[in-house]
Image (cartoon, rainbow, N blue to C red):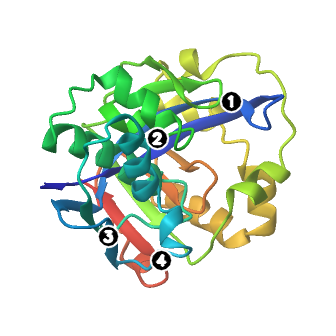
Amino acid sequence: MIVFPNAKINIGLNIIARRPDGYHDLETVFYPIKINDVLEVIECDELEFESSGIDIPGDVNDNLCIKGYHLLKRDFLKLPPVKIHLHKNIPIGAGLGGGSADAAFFIKLMNEKFSLGLSADRMMDYARLLGADCAFFIESKPVFAFEKGDEFEPVKLDLSGYFIVLVMPDEHVSTAEAYRGVKPAPVSESLYELIKTPIANWKRTIKNEFEGHIFRDHPVIRGVKAELYEHGALYASMSGSGASVFGIFEQLPDLKAMEVNYQVFYNV
């Protein structure tokens, strides 16, 4: 059985407060985009994981799909072993939620393949145990995310009439690095309201608070955002904690010059 986990972008990101549990209260808007991994699961004699495409660093036992299997196995004792093959296409360390998407789609796949009878809400509960943004990918619909980024309110946001282009420079920004440089503070106007305004206004009103210090320490990422505006983007921003930057365009831009130095993905 094969599924195609999709990436997401963050439109705006505000860090509101530091939480007693070590996380942060934040607000952001998650929007799904058409950059996909490929995830296949087949029943076998023992639990296995293999990957192709982009190299996945770290211990295989730390992979969120493996952790997702053990999480489900805890409650469904008769769940058989499976062989997991992940073809990685979503850039890693890019603020696109690729690992979280793989985990959420794995839960959905296992639910369907083995008829576990889990509702969307129950699958979200499992996903929240694997990562703050994992639950979003159970339904992959535009949402206003708050608290740790794992509580959602639907938003009526349809960008299908625009062209979203994602640019990935050869940079890596860890989540730890991103959070080290921010100072939590309340916002005067919530993203929940700002996202309803015309896209032409977003450049002035919607910010990603990680950009300040990350642009200082990674000027290449700052330059990518500037180039997207030079090519006519209505709005451009780093996604999540970076390092990818997306632009929203009214017409499909010619970014051949950028393709020489960066990975460029067209969400069309």
Residue 134: give its label.
2
Q: Quadrant of residue 25?
A: top right
- Front position in the image: 217 or 116: 116
The disc labelled 4 sits on which kind of residue? Tyr
The residues bearing labels 1 and 3 have C-alpha atoms spaced at a distance of: 36 Å
Q: Which quadrant of the figure contains the N terminus? A: bottom left
Q: Earlier in the sequence, mark 3 or mark 4?
A: 3
The residues bearing labels 2 and 4 have C-alpha atoms spaced at a distance of: 27 Å
Which element is circle 4 on?
A: loop
Report the residue at 55% width, 54% height from top. 95
The disc labelled 2 sits on which kind of residue? Cys
The disc labelled 1 sits on which kind of residue? Leu
Residue pushed farthest front?
Answer: 78
Residue 100: give its label.
none
The residues bearing labels 2 and 1 have C-alpha atoms spaced at a distance of: 15 Å
The disc labelled 3 sits on which kind of residue? Glu
Residue 26: give its label.
1
Front: mark 1 or 3: 3
Mark 4 lies on residue = 262
Front: mark 3 or 4: 3
The residues bearing labels 3 and 4 have C-alpha atoms spaced at a distance of: 34 Å
Q: Earlier in the sequence, mark 4 or mark 1?
A: 1
40 vs 143: above or below:
below
- Front position in the image: 238 or 91: 91
The residues bearing labels 3 and 2 have C-alpha atoms spaced at a distance of: 22 Å
Front: mark 3 or 2: 3
